[in-house]
Image (cartoon, rainbow, N blue to C red):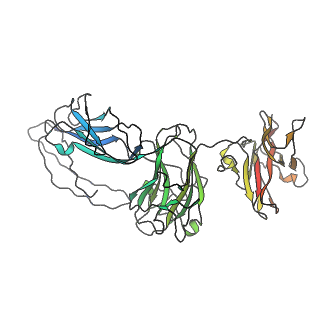
Amino acid sequence: GDVWFQQQTTVPLLRGGAIEQFQAIYRGEHGGAFTSDMALDDFSYDTAPTADLALTMFLSPGLSAPAGSPLTVTVEIQNNGLSPQTGFNLQFDANMSGSPIVETYVGSAIGAGMTANFSFATPFIPIAGPNTLDATVLLGDPFPGNDTISTTFNGLPLVSSFPYLEDFESGMGNWYSTGTTNTWAFGTPAKAVVNGAASGVNAWTTGGLTGQYSNSEQSQLNGPIFDLTSLSNPHISLSIWWESEFSWDGLIVQTSIDGGISWQTVGAFGDPNNWYTDNTLGGAPAGSSDGWTGRGTTGLTGYVTALHDLPGVAGIASVLVRFAFGSDGSVTGEGIAIDDIRIFDPISGPGQAPQPGLAVMNINNAIDVTNMTFGVSSGLGGPYATSVTAGDIVAFHFEGAPSQSIFLVSGPTSPAIAVYPGIGQFDIGTGVAASGIPTGISLVADGSSPVFPGAFFRTSASGAADVGFTMPAFPIGYVTTFQPVLLTGGPTVVAFGNAIELNAL
């Protein structure tokens, strides 16, 4: 913007008569987030030249590319002249080296008014950081003003080792910010509300380290390039703290598999695990109405961990990830801080997985021990773990077949100490008796008994049961591990649920 561009357009002869008449209409359009001005000047109309080739755009690279890896340079050629063209030369020069690569277009002739793509056979190897490419078509026609195009893009490291964790304690971690009225800053946030990092001392935040973000901001925090060919179910987690005008200013996560030409928003409002808090964002970050937003009663008093899968990118060799922030034209705030970014494939633990419809247990929103991230709803193999403060309620939630008894046992964690094919496995005990039943376990509740507390351990007609008791004053740390065995009402008779470790706070 803010510069004049020359645009040439071929007007086809529609009637083919001695006199041609036409009317040109110029129409400007803009989105809802910004205002703008447009101007037109210096019109001319003349007979199309016999020869006039123009370069219109770079098709490759995009906004970023792996540093140190060979890259194919591809341009689009447009024939503005009357004569078909082939056999002409093109060149590209990288980072103003003064030694351009010259090659010849030998494809099918490009007809009048038509376009064609050309990929240079000689690759270009980007350096880390900003890179500049200049490409020129060398036809020698009378209109040299449209012969050359230029682009600038970032050479980024390629991340191919997972799980990936960036806590920013060794620097920016090859993350960088872009955008309009960009206020992203790296360091230790020191604001009235948003202060400090989630871990260590460094984080990224909008509004600078001590101030507020701008009105009408559209900015991005961009990461390196991720090679996800080794991941089958990639997920992202991050520590996030938001303090922004609710329902107007907010942040989203996006991915791109075409070098940043197009972006896909990750997840939606209402998704679990602290994902987006609103779907009516007036600031429209990257055009989205979803995002994290809020302050005061809708904001936070510290970092939370947000988690989501990354759809559509598993097995892709070049994936970009960015955080896009958007604000409307009035009222600002401290903004949003980000730390501890993880990208990884969930690892299923060695314990019994929840068996939906047969045997599932949750206690106070337990998370899996292997990843220390995922809830019981993930379906991953256990064991899981939860922590409860003395005096608070230990809330058991069971799911299984309707109107069935629940047998709750406890003991030390010992994944797969006894396995029963088609039924499940015991994940608690100290050994296995000759009967095949683990030793060192205790029966906490017998759902087949009408005596307290067994009478409460029975699924309802909907297949669920909720039981709670007050947490005693245990020493801080591990207490015991619970595991349910539920009757199924079917041929297997019983099914094992996932085990959950109880810790005292």
Residue 166 % position (x, y): 54, 51
Q: Is residue 334 left or right of residue 104?
A: right
Count all numbered tags in the image, as a single digit.
Answer: 0
Q: Is residue 394 left or right of residue 219?
A: right
Q: Is residue 479 in view?
A: yes
Q: Is residue 464 in view?
A: no
Instruction: Name the foreground residue: 306 vs 397.
Output: 306
For this orientation, the residue located farthest to the bottom is 192
Above/below status of 476 relative to 314: below
For this orientation, the residue located farthest to the left is 18
Residue 466 % position (x, y): 77, 54
Task: Please identify the quadrant where the N terminus is shown.
Answer: bottom left
Instruction: Name the foreground residue: 46 vs 429.
Output: 429
Instruction: Name the foreground residue: 167 vs 426.
Output: 167
Residue 465 % position (x, y): 78, 51
Instruction: Name the foreground residue: 367 vs 363.
Output: 367
Residue 459 % position (x, y): 79, 48
Task: Please identify the quadrant where the C terminus is shown.
Answer: bottom right
Q: Is residue 144 left or right of residue 315?
A: left
Above/below status of 236 relative to 418: below
Q: Residue at x 46, y 52 (%)?
A: 175
Above/below status of 372 relative to 211: above
Based on the displayed image, in which of its 4 quarters is residue 485 positioned? top right
